[in-house]
Amino acid sequence: MLIRAGYQIRYETDIATPMMAMLSVHPSRNKDLRTAHRITASPDVPIYDYLDAFGNVCTRVTVPEGGLTLSCDFTIEDDGLPDRAALDAIQHEVEDLPDEVLVFLLGSRYCETDRLSETAWSLFGHVAPGWRRVQAIVDFTHGHVTFGYDFARPTKTAWDAHQEQQGVCRDFAHLAIALCRCMNIPARYCTGYLGDIGIPPSDAAMDFSAWFDVYLGGAWHTFDARHNVARIGRILMARGRDATDTALTTTFGPARLVGFDVHTDEVSELG
């Protein structure tokens, strides 16, 4: 299947303001692109990319006085299959985990394992380790937190989401990630496109989405605590320890977000 996706985002500033953005498709999906993926800036100012420590494409740009619009439109091919389940995937002993995976067991800015450890073990210590335990964590998070755009705030952490029982997709992901890490299951945060493909269309405006991966049975597997169902057409943009590592934009100075439009649609042909 083909998916046409992209965005138009505008910031306004009173002074020239440096910005870092993670608005590119993740390199792991580059081979699936069927049209060019280019970020365009208006006005036309210099931009350049680099790869961060997690393998994400980061874009550096300076928003000129007055403001800047970043936009992108591309078509990508997807296998059209829902998120894969591996019900027999085992949970590894910590001493058997690859070195590069260990960082995803540690607490991070938005995932306070120290504050949630006792809760996690009381809720999931009796559940068989492996896929079943992760699914129990996802089921709990999905039922414990109420979704709503009005519940979003940039400082909300996994602990806050657990206590307030409200949040957006990133809060669902942060809470589930923290609980997994408390149970010695490596978990990493993911952000990207997730359109209404294979499900009834939503009246809400399209946005980017957050989900998470866990390391079981020698591989990473996708879970989604907000939706808690297998979905079709995820397009990964960035992944890391939490939203700190995958922020869509980070401005180094005052800037106002005044325009935000995202599209993700299945299409029948290139164009």
Image: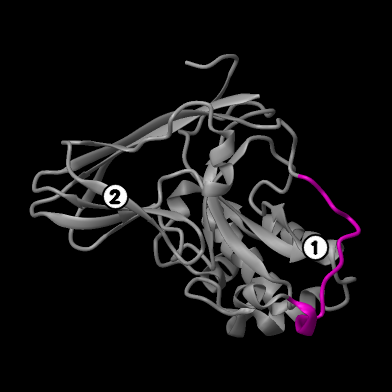
Precedes in sequence: disc 2 or disc 1: 2
User: Residue drawn 81% across and 80% down?
Assistant: 93
Residue 48 counted in the magenta span: no
Distance, label 2 to label 1, CA atoms, is 42 Å
Say few, some or many: other residues with alpha carbon within 10 Å of mark 1 (under 14 / 14 to 19 / 20 or more): some
User: Residue drawn 34% across and 51% down?
Assistant: 49
Say few, some or many: other residues with alpha carbon within 10 Å of mark 2 (under 14 / 14 to 19 / 20 or more): few
Q: Nearer the viewer, mark 2 or mark 1?
A: 2
Q: Main secondary structure of the magenta part?
A: loop
The residue wearing badge 1 is: 136
Q: In the visual, does 127 lie left or right of 109?
A: right
**Which residue type does callout 1 highlight?**
Ala
The residue wearing badge 2 is: 48
Q: In the visual, does 158 lie left or right of 227?
A: left
Q: Is residue 200 above or below residue 12?
A: above
Residue 232 visible from this viewpoint: yes
Q: Is residue 260 above or below residue 254?
A: above
User: Residue drawn 44% across and 50% down?
Assistant: 150
Q: Given contact means CB atoms under 8 Å apart, are the residues at marks 2 and 1 in contact?
A: no
- Mark 2, secondary structure of its residue: strand
Residue 262 visible from this viewpoint: no
User: Residue drawn 61% across and 64% down?
Assistant: 188
Magenta stretch bounds: 84-97
Q: Position of residue 77 (x, y in %)?
A: 61, 29
- Mark 1, secondary structure of its residue: helix
Q: In the visual, does 263 lie left or right of 145?
A: left
Q: Position of residue 223 (x, y in %)?
A: 70, 53
Most foreground residue, 95 or 135: 95
Q: Which mark is residue 41?
A: none
- Position of the N terminus by quadrant: top right
Q: Quadrant of residue 98?
A: bottom right
Q: Is residue 218 above or below residue 117?
A: above
